Image: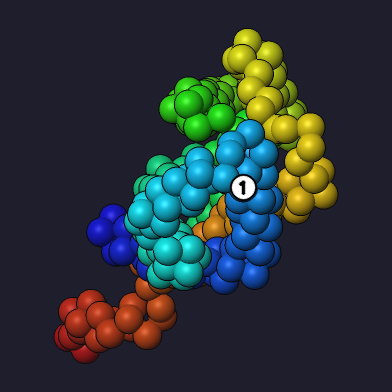
Amino acid sequence: MMRRLLVFGMLVGLLAGLVAFGFASIAGEPQVDAAIALEEAAAQGEAVAPHSHGEDEAAATHSHEEPAEVSRSTQKGIGLAVATGLYGVAMGGLFAIACAVAYGRIGVPGMRATAATVALVGFIAVALVPFLKYPANPPAVGNPDTIDRRTGLYVVMVLVSVLAALIAAQVGRVLAGRSAGRGGGWNAWLASAGAFTVLVTVAAVLLPVVNEVPVSFPAELLWRFRLSSLGTQALVWVVLGLGFGPLAERVLNPSPARRTTALPVSASPASSGTAG
């Protein structure tokens, strides 16, 4: 059973990756192209201003001798499709495991509600909270020398947020078990949400601030890029939450036609006993 759930999760994840690729191509890549154009224009201006004519020719010859390893068209075409597809498959597998663990343990009925709940919590913990602390930046923003540090801080924020979500879920389960009366489940959910909020807020305050956006960078372009980045993440979780539940229910609750196939075999002894 777990194997089929995992396969269904990866298939839904692949679909989520393709949907994310389509959205990123339409909403995100134009912002990346605009940011790259600004970066190239700024680099050309800095190269021309301080150098003599001979030095400019040498710099231009040197720049022509070092073409990009991967063309921009390949990056935003097959490269982006492969990246989003692999990401979706990986997230789909992890999502299936999370839903299997959460099924019947989080106080919601059925796998469809479980998948929707896990997707909502996953989006908040894995995408939204880290985004609020360390939002995505286009290629022209950020110091290349600090990319490893910035990536490490983002990963730390993701891990802290996921751990906070697990702790908050456990708090909610314990409180729901102790207050099984009227309104106990709602109060447990509120306490769980409060615990998660406190934990991630403390982590966000303690982790260092990273702000490398140049003053001259267009604020509107930065905002559009960040919205498209968050929207791509949101679409992945929406497809996972809506697509995995119905497929998983087919595994957990077989169709009536499959159940009735075994009915004559199980009913035959009773019928023979009645006839005797």
Residue 100 in view, yes or no: no
Residue at horizontal 66%, vertical 50%? Answer: 41
Q: Residue at x 42, y 64 (%)?
A: 71
In terms of secondary structure, where does tag 1 sit?
Answer: helix
Which residue corresponds to the image point at 37% horizontal and 52% vertical from the top-left? 66
> Which residue in the rendered view is the most extreme toward the bottom?
275
Residue 40 visible? The answer is: yes
Q: In this view, does 48 lie above or below 185?
A: below
Residue 29 versus residue 241: which sits nearer the camera?
Answer: 29
Report the residue at 63% width, 34% height from top.
Answer: 50
Q: Is the residue 258 above or below the residue 50 in the image?
A: below
Q: How many marks?
A: 1
Q: Quarter of the image containing the N terminus?
A: bottom left
Q: In this view, does 271 lie above or below 20?
A: below
Which quarter of the figure has residue 124?
top right
**Residue 166, how many percent across, how many down?**
51, 28
How far across and how far down the image is residue 54, in percent? 51, 44
Give the quarter of the image for residue 241. Answer: bottom right
Q: Name the residue under label 1.
A: 44
Q: Locate residue 178, reporting x and y percent.
A: 61, 21
In this rendering, the answer to whether 148 lies above or below 79 is above
Please give left or right for residue 136 compared with residue 68 in the image: right
Q: Is residue 81 left or right of residue 124?
A: left
Indicate the amino acid at tag 1: Gln
Neighbor class of circle 1 (other Cα within 10 Å; few <14, some 14-19, many 20+) is: few
Residue 48 in the image, given as x and y percentages of width and height = 63, 43
Q: Which one is nearer the viewer's eye here, 37 or 125?
A: 37
Q: In which quarter of the image is the C terminus?
A: bottom left
Front-lying residue, 243 or 264: 243
